[in-house]
Structure formats: structure tokens, C-alpha cells
Amino acid sequence: MRGSNPAGSITSARLADFVQCMSAGQRYDARVVAINGGAITVEIYPV
């Protein structure tokens, strides 16, 4: 994490896929695409 801090959790229908890929060593980054009150939408992509 490049100077960032965790701020919540991922809720996705593909969460199991992310966990499996991260366990295999794949790294991901995220970009904030929307903020609506306390709900923050991010785009997650492999790096």
C-alpha cells in the first residue's frame, strides 16, 4: 500500500475470485470512482 490506509471492506459478487488470486500472489490497486455519503465505490485492477 503506497502511503494509504485500509478504510473499509470489499463487497463484490467476485470477492472469492479476488481472495483466490491474492492468495496466489496477484496484487491489486484501487481507484476511487464515486463517493456517496459513506458509500465509496472503487475500481479494482491488477498491477
Image (spheres, rainbow, N blue to C red):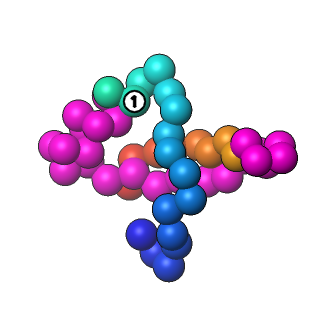
Identify the residue at image location x=50%, y=40%. 10
* Residue at the extreme bottom of the image, as rendered: 3
State left or right for residue 31 relative to residue 12. right
Identify the residue at image location x=23%, y=34%. 20
* Residue at the extreme right of the image, as rendered: 37
* Figure quadrant of residue 18: top left
Residue stretch rendered in magenta on the structure: 17-39
**Which residue was labeled with disc 1?**
15
Q: Does the magenta stretch include residue 18?
A: yes
- Residue at disc 1, secondary structure: helix
Q: Where is residue 44 in the image (x, y as percent from the top left)?
A: 51, 44
Q: Where is residue 21 in the image (x, y as percent from the top left)?
A: 25, 38
State left or right for residue 38 relative to residue 47. right
Q: Where is residue 31 in the image (x, y as percent from the top left)?
A: 61, 53
State left or right for residue 39 relative to residue 10. right
Identify the residue at image location x=54%, y=51%. 8
Residue 2, placed above or below residue 11: below
Q: Does the magenta stretch include residue 23?
A: yes
* Residue at the extreme left of the image, as rendered: 24
Amino acid type, callout 1: Leu
Q: Where is residue 40 in the image (x, y as percent from the top left)?
A: 70, 46
In depth, the one of 1 and 9 nearer the eye is 9
Q: Quadrant of the C terminus?
A: bottom left
Q: In which quarter of the image is the N terminus?
A: bottom left
Identify the residue at image location x=47%, y=20%. 13
* Residue at the extreme top of the image, as rendered: 13
Residue 14, placed above or below residue 21: above
